[in-house]
Image (tube, rainbow, N blue to C red):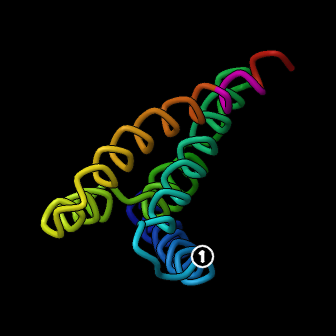
Amino acid sequence: MGYLYVAMGGAFGAVFRYLSMNLIGLSNFPYGTFFVNITGSFLIGMFLSYESGVQSLPQELKLLIVVGFLGAFTTFSTFSMDSIHLIQKSEYFKAIAYVTGSLALSFSAFIIGMQIFKQS
């Protein structure tokens, strides 16, 4: 039954990623993927920290939100594809900035998200 929660959350997460990336628009830099991965990392950190600070939330809710929604909202495959496209276009500085910026800011966003509920 858990797969239904993952599927429902995943459907909404994928739609929210699509909408977010379209709102941000196309440019010479993959800002849409950059935004969704950093935002998703922050939300995952926040949710997991909140969940560990209170009585354990139902497994179904974790599957729906973290695995389904946020798993589909964030996208490592598009991050990889965007990185390769920048390299193929010989935009090495942008590729390095994108990869290091994405990783550093996503990890930082996750930690900040966790800290919000650790201090509460």
Q: Residue at x 36, y 38 (%)?
A: 100
- Image coordinates of residue 88 in percent, x first then y, are 12, 66
Q: Residue at x 44, y 68 (%)?
A: 4
Q: Nearer the viewer, residue 28 or 26?
A: 28
In the rendered view, would you say 90 is above or below 45? below
Q: Main secondary structure of the magenta part?
A: helix
Left or right, residue 84 beside residue 20: left
**Which residue is nearer to you in this view: 40 or 33?**
33
Q: How many marks?
A: 1
Q: Is residue 3 above or below residue 16?
A: above
Residue 11 in the image, given as x and y percentages of width and height: 48, 76
Quarter of the image where one finds residue 43: top right
Q: Residue at x 50, y 39 (%)?
A: 106
Quadrant including the N terminus: bottom left
Q: Which quarter of the figure is the C terminus placed in?
A: top right
Which span of residues is magenta-colored? Answer: 112-116
Q: Residue at x 65, y 38 (%)?
A: 47
Report crowding for label 1: few under 14, some 14 to 19, many 20 or more residues within 10 A (C-alpha): few
* Badge 1 element: helix
Residue at numbered disc 1 = 24
Relative to 14, residue 92 above or below: above
Task: Please indicate whether residue 77 sits to the left or right of residue 116 in the image.
Answer: left
Looking at numbered disc 1 in the image, what kind of residue is underneath it? Ile
109 versus 18 height, above or below = above
Residue toward you, 101 or 2 = 101
- Tell me if residue 11 is in the magenta stretch: no
Expressed as whole percent of the image width and height from the top left, the position of residue 44 reads 57, 41
Q: Residue furthest left?
A: 88
Question: In the rendering, at what x and y percent does residue 25 appear?
Answer: 54, 82
